[in-house]
Image: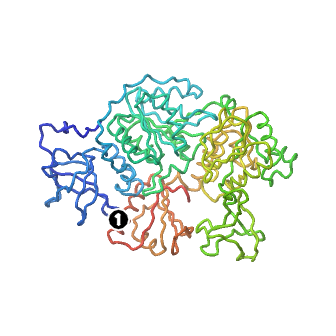
Amino acid sequence: MPPVPDDPAPERAGAPAPRVARVVVDVPLAHLDRTFDYAVPDTMAGEVRAGCRVRVRFAGQLVDGVVLELADSSDTGRELAPLAKLVSSEPVLTPEVATLARSVAQRWGGTLTDVLRLALPPRRAAAEKRPPAEPPPPPEPPDPAGFARYPAGTSLLAAVATGRPARAVWTALPGEDWPARLAELCRAALSGGRGALVVVPDGRDLDRLAAAAGATLPQGAFVVLRADAAPDARYRRFLDAARGSAKVVLGTRAAAFAPVADLGLVAIWDDGDDLHAEPRAPYAHARDVLLHRAHLASCAAVVAATARTAEAALLVASGWAHELAADRATLRAAAPRVQALGEDHELARDPAARTARLPSLAHRVARQALADGAPVLVQVPRAGYAPGLSCERCRAPARCAVCSGPLGIAPAPGPGGSRVPACRWCARPAATFDCPHCHGTKLRASVVGAARTAEELGRAFPGAAVRVSGRGSGVLPSVSGGPSLVVATPGAEPVAEGGYGAALLLDSWALLGRADLRAGEETLRRWMNAAALVRPAGQVVVAADAAHPVVQALVRWDPGWLAERELADRRELGFPPATRMASLSGSPAALAEFLAAARLPDAADLLGPVPEPSRPGQEGERERFLVRVPRGEGLALATALAEVQGVRSARKAAEHVRVQLDPLEL
């Protein structure tokens, strides 16, 4: 545990205070991605520590910085400028996190400053004045009964408790109380005197995990780091982890860098969720950060989900991790019955099932569940009322006459309110429409949202209550176990008391038809997360062709099979995760200059350019290149791209090139 502020650095007692501080300055320029030596004034000699915040004079300005390390001398060969101010003697950057941050910057072609901005929350002085609390004593190991349904589950708990670096890809059973299982893994780590770090996609999942941890872990043993917490509360909890008062950290994406003392376990839930992908440079995925951290710390790692990604399949195929899944008999007892509308016998009974949005099978299943007194979950891919419009005559997407943004219809503000098409970019209403292709003047809904679906279901089931969960209408954390229809968008499905009696998965074309490398994998993840909320005796109806591989994986409840199939296809085609790939975006001139200066690995394969889709407020033509290399050349690619960014930064290049390694969208 790092020394607390009122501890006079006992590790250097009796020795002269170090005279040089190596500082990482908070300057977002790639060519300045290194430490700078500053002299430690005599007035600060007893207070400046590795990991503390300071202010320094840099290029004529006072800027923030973090002391990376202390030294007795400098090899710069010149007189050093002194530290301008000691902001705080609190060592917020631990040596382990500093090593992780530098490694992440190198692996993803970013800068240490960018990573530290993600890792260190803003300072709040009041939180630092609190004395550190003593951590609670290690608890007894958890009851292994929760993991008994998985053949190697109890072995995993025992390995975590004894501090062994066990690695597992855990496929949770449908209806599994996954927050309780993750809390048990944290308790196992605590019982062995080590810390744990668990990352989940969003605040709703974090609330469930925190509730389970409160019932399983000793009081004061864990803290919750969340993006929507008040700055004072977030910094106070961060300090509890940095000081070792709380040895378990639960959080969302940014918590992957939390300073957990004596780390013994890292775990991530639902690693396929795009919320785990950091939208800020260097764009590292939380799963990859945690796995890299497990390697550096030689600790246990668990990648857990209801479905499985190709990246998780690669971990199993490479031998880095072991599969943790239930046998087929246990799975059949826990899983609901899944039916596809494209099955031959159903098409014979209802020939219009392929084109109907809510065919007779879905009606029958929903009516039966409501009659049994159970809620019914209806998943639709899009929020809103009619988020996508097209010309009624030629079916061309409807665009705004001012900014060319897509037209849509939002839900009416109240009973009897008018629904006027409006641009989803600039919000200008489109009271009239003239198609530039066929000059048609009428619009049709090309995409039906959750609000429109709720209206249709209200008419189809007049006696049932209809609730909507999703963006705009609000996300419901849970619903009662009584009869009702719950319309939700993917990721916003509330948990039902006792489980849903049935689930209807509609508009499959909107998910399966996306031109995206991960369309099949992402579709199965969304479907399985919804279907897992259905009780074992319930039914799931998916509006899709039964012959589609993704539908087959859902019907058989076999996400591992689809993940292995996806991995094999990507290996054959040379796509991630079988390879490493970088996306370069910018103007044609900037990209040409960038590539001319890049010393790419010999095995690099350059793909492109292709036009980059325009975004709101974006000016000028932009293109994108993809650079592909074998996995073993990934670090060399990241280094080459970072070098070019440094050269362009030093030359003050007028145009920026966005560099992203391992992008989710290709």
The quarter of the image holding the C terminus is bottom right
Q: Amino acid at mark 1?
A: Gly
Looking at the image, residue 581 sits to the left or right of residue 231; the answer is: right
Q: Position of residue 21 (x, y in %)?
A: 20, 51
Query: Label 1: which residue?
Result: 646
Count neighbours of disc 1 (C-alpha within 10 A) and say few if under 14, some if 14 to 19, many if 20 or more: some
Judge by depth and name the residue closer to the eye, 164 or 450. 450
Judge by depth and name the residue closer to the eye, 225 or 545. 225
Q: Position of residue 340 (x, y in %)?
A: 76, 45
Q: Position of residue 335 (x, y in %)?
A: 68, 34
Residue appearing at x 38%, y 49% in the figure: 119
Looking at the image, residue 205 sits to the left or right of residue 51; the answer is: right
Residue appearing at x 84%, y 52% in the figure: 352
Report if residue 337 is visible in the image. Answer: no
Judge by depth and name the residue closer to the eye, 1 or 287. 1
Q: Is residue 284 above or below residue 258?
A: below
Q: Residue 641 lies in what quarter of the image?
A: bottom left
Residue appearing at x 39%, y 65% in the figure: 599
The quarter of the image holding the N terminus is top left
Report if residue 650 is visible in the image. Answer: yes
Looking at the image, residue 246 sits to the left or right of residue 199; the answer is: left
Q: Position of residue 449 (x, y in %)?
A: 69, 55
Figure disc tally: 1
Q: Is residue 614 above or below residue 572?
A: below
What sort of colour scheme is used for the picture? rainbow
Give SS at disc 1.
helix
Name the residue at the right extreme: 349
